[in-house]
Amino acid sequence: MALLVILAIVAALGLYVVFAYNGLVDRRNRMKNAFAQIDVQLTRRHDLIPNLVESVKGYMQHERETLEAVISARNQAIAGLQAAAARPGDPDAIRKLAGSEAALDSALGRLLAVVEAYPELKADENMLRLQEELSSTENKVAFARQSFNDAVMAYNTACQSFPTNFIAGVFSFQQGEFLEIEAESKREVPTVSF
Amino acid sequence: MDFFRSQDLARSKSRGLVLSFLTATLAVAVVGGFILAWLLAVTGAAPGQDPPDRGLVMALGALIAGIILLASALRHRQLAAGGGEVARTLGGRALTGEESDPRYRRLENVVEEMAIAAGLPVPAVYVLDQESGINAFAAGLGTRDAAIAVTRGALETLTRDELQGVVGHEFSHILNGDMRLNQRLLGYLFGLMVVSLIGRTILEAAGRGRVGRSSASARAPARGALGLGLTGAPALAVAGLGLIVLGWLGVLAGRVLQAAVSRQRELLADASAVQFTRNPAGLAGALRKIAASGHGARLTAARRDEVRHMLFADSRRLAGLLATHPTIERRLQALEPGRHPGLAVSRPRTGLVGEIGQPGPASLVSASRLLASLPPAATDAAHGDWDAPLLALALIAEAKNPLRDHQLSAAGQTLGVSAAESLASLANSVRPMADDQRLVLLDLAAPALRRQSLPRRETLASLARRFAEADGIIAPFEAALLANLELYLREEDTHLTHRRPSVAPPGSAALGLVQWMANAAGGRRDAALATGRQVLAESGFPGMAATDLPAGELPPAGAAGILGQMDYQYRAILVEALDAAAREDGVLQPRESALLRACCAALECPLPRTLDERANSLPVTVP
């Protein structure tokens, strides 16, 4: 009888471990899937920058440095995104991505501030379209970031709660990192209105 | 929602709709017959009997039913011309790709980007210039003849994101199979509402002060039509009252039918649009602007009531059972942050088949990349009425070999010398392009190709076939391009007249397609063919046991034409088989993937683009 009880307890414990483990894996996968959406939108943002530089450089002969800063920030952001996309569960990679995206934000902000000084460029139809697309992509990044952070929160909570935290510890589930992109100076994307 | 199932469901629903329409017609005919007979008796125009004469009631009922059926049959014939017909009914103007107003160009860009992303042929774009309300609709019988119409008010008030949300909603109707249902309903509604339309027209004519003359001339047809020997004032009174009552009955029956095409479809389309763009803010912004603006979603065109069920937002504010859309508040609620509509939608199928009809934001990014990679000269050519056919010919000619002199002279003889010159220069710009880019160019040219006159389309189709068959062998990709081109150039009313919903899927046509796919596999052709064939047989594709390979090469458009009649559940199997044949050696070559895409397009199974390369594929330009 006692043996049976012990067996039952062991079996129940075993079942618990299996379910808890699977639950953690599920949450981690959701977090990774949510990152895929950020990946898409950031990729779009990076795609837009060469076009932006292309349409701006005809007007700006004297702003070579600003343009080069944007391009190098873009290249770093691409590298950061690639690293993060390979390992979306790695807090280091996410932090680096956040840093490089913030740098890109600032570089873009400076460029758009310079654009303000060129009325012809500001009214250029191509330029208007690009700015509109940039701000639209910005919205989508924000939306994707929100659902990624929600997924990270759900996963981290599971990792920290008792008694799942033991399972997370034993199988070394690493907690996720929130993606927070904070530019040095909060950039305002000029809104286009008709 | 599974694309294939929802398409088949839409077809069976249209059959159900026929039944409801016939019931509604019968109801209107019976009630209308009684009322007319009673009116005749009361006004003393016909011999008065207390229970109206049964023969008279039946004759009048049959007359009414006849008018309704005739009118809706005529309207169906008109609508077979394609989705654009509906837009023209409402005063729409087709955009030609050469607009100067940036807002019109923005609409075209948004539509093109979404179509390429979803793997759909680019629909014709219409603007309703007279409408200052914010509204839009998609019309058409299939993906190939679809049209999207947007009001001027929407273009003037919405931002790009909001416009994208609205267009995404309309694309969802295309992908969810709602369009076909809506289009059929249009024909039925016209029949049911035709009496009130006639009544309105007569009233308007009378209101224009021609009463004196028209009453004299109206009397004669009234007598002739009713054949009851009525004279003078009673006849006019009966005609007037009868028209009012009948018109009202028909409109009521139409409203009930419209509302029966479920309001749920609108919520589904909203959710799919968000799944597509991952930007609920855009759609929500558009809905809020409708709620806030004075004009709302109102339309002013005379025949606005016919299209109520297919609009982006209801043009009238009817509540309850007769509402065609959920309220704006309800739709906004479903879009609220935290709910993330559509994000939880699971894919019932896996693999390539699961992707069909399910575009996502990655498809949009991939599409804008592809569009940006095209030389502007080629994109302009795809938009122009003059250049688009030449571009299509150049694409066919260049699919295998550079354009040859004898092909140029053939084109020169048929189309003229200047056309041959443009053809040569277009061929030069096509030459360095990848298969994927060529396929997109053909998709971009679709609206301009459909605008060609019928004789010109026939000339083009025969020239294209001559180009492709010039050396006696049709290469796989060439065949796929040709199939798509021929399907664009074909008259579209085959959808209505020749459609047999549950036709047995022809096994040899399916095998013919798999054979093209296998031909692209080069050395492993036989293995690829066997794999594809095995999938067809194992998944129960009908007629496979007895079917041998088609003896010769099947004409490509012919095979796609036969298979285009097939139920969607079988198309799913075929797409699976094509995919298996292409991946037989474990890798999907760019050529195979382009061919797969072309085959899916020919089968009207929109395959969304995927973002498979990393961001560094675009060159960085240093100033």
Image (spheres, helix red, strand yellow):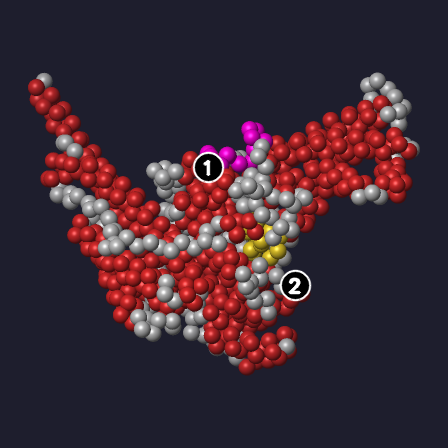
- Could you say where residue B265 lies in the image, as x and y percent from the top left? 50, 38
Determine whether the residue tagged by mark 1 lies in a helix, strand or loop: helix
Labels 1 and 2: the sequence-earlier one? 1
Pointer 1 residue? B331
Residue B543 seen in render: no
**Magenta residue check for B321:** yes
Q: Which residue is mark 2?
A: B453
The answer to whether residue B64 is seen in the rendering is: yes
User: Label 2 is placed on what type of residue?
Assistant: Ser
Above or below, comparing residue B5 to residue A130 in the picture: above
**Which residue is at the front of the view, B177 or A124?**
A124
Q: Which residues are magenta?
A: B319-330
Q: At label 1, which amino acid type do we have?
A: Arg
Identify the residue at image location x=30%, y=70%.
A63
Quarter of the image for the N terminus of chain B: give it: top left
| Quarter-of-image position of residue B221 | top right
Direction from residue B559 to residue B42 in the image, left or right: right
Q: Quadrant of residue B231?
A: top right
In the image, B462: left or right of A110? right
Q: Residue at x 36, y 65 (%)?
A: A117
Q: Residues within 10 Å of mark 2 (few under 14, many from 20)?
A: few
Q: The residue tagged with tag 2: helix, strand or loop?
A: loop
Q: Is residue B453 left or right of residue B400?
A: right
- Residue A176 rendering spot, x and y as whole percentages: 19, 45
